[in-house]
Amino acid sequence: MSRAPVPRAVLVTGASRGIGRAVAHAFAQQGDRVAVHVRSAVDEGRETLASLPGTGHVLVVADLGEAEQAAGLPAAAEEALGEPVRVLVNNAGIATGADLAHPPATTDTLTWQRHWETYLRVNTLGTALVTHAMTRRLVELGLPGRVISIGTRGVHKGEPEFPAYAASKAALHAMDASLAVALAPHDIAVATVAPGFIETERVADRLNSPAGDEIRAGSPFGRVGRPEEVASAVLWLASPEAVWASGATLDLNGASHLRP
């Protein structure tokens, strides 16, 4: 008979809705205590918090685009939860959107620079600061831990309208590979999930538009992914049984893009 998992303190960044909310729910469902992070969507964060099964969950607010707030987020979560964060899920970040499109052939230099700075400041540097603070604390305390970052299929397939977005996520893929090697002696496993198109509130308009059929046809399953499917993968990667997956990138794109 397998033993029930020991409850852990979990920090999920960008958990106001979508994938982050589904991930927070999956950990809470198995008995973990979750710190739900938001930047400005406090009301939605409270909705996530109220929806979680179990008790002891907390809401933490920080702007990952501000270095000091990003670096202080794990400590804020630890204070609110009353124990060190043992699992970090890096989900927060600036995603693709029409106002952030910057195809190289038609984008002026200043706009190009502005979008690159925006994506890299939040998706790359902010996430790196949160991860460094969380893992350094575990090393200091001699505790094992797990880090899982939500990357993107676009790292491998390309994002022609949003090259800075793909690059900012590619940096996380590379960071996780390096940290998996560096932190293994401290019993901290690190892995990446690379989703394809996922059905969330943010993209509902696109899926309901004439482009929706084309998007769904990108997978031979004839649909897009669900947040719960990403959450299930994250939950496994954070489990004791998945320690040997440290350093791996798990593709979750419904065979819409295959890597050699």
Image: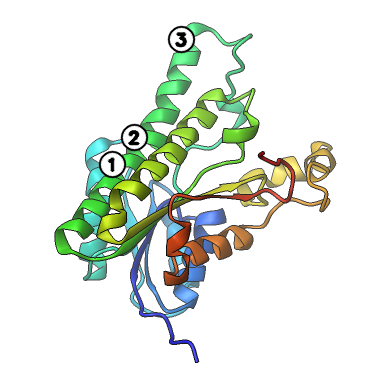
Q: Is residue 37 left or right of residue 229?
A: left
Quadrant for the C terminus in the image: top right
| Callout 3: SS | helix
Percent position of residue 194, x then y = 57, 46
Query: What residue would you read off at disc 1?
Result: 129
Q: Is residue 132 above or below residue 52?
A: above
Badge 3: few (under 14), some or many (20 or more) residues near its Cα, within 10 Å? few
Seen from the viewer's position, the closer of residues 161 and 242 is 242
Disc marking residue 110? 3
Q: Is residue 131 visible?
A: yes
Distance of label 3 from label 1 (alpha carbons): 27 Å
As shown in the figure, which amino acid type bears the numbered disc 3? Answer: Leu
| Callout 1: SS | helix
Seen from the viewer's position, the closer of residues 161 and 42 is 161
Query: What residue would you read off at disc 2?
Result: 125
Percent position of residue 95, x then y = 53, 37
Observer-side mark, 2 or 3, equals 2
As shown in the figure, which amino acid type bears the numbered disc 1? Answer: Leu
Observer-side mark, 3 or 1, equals 1
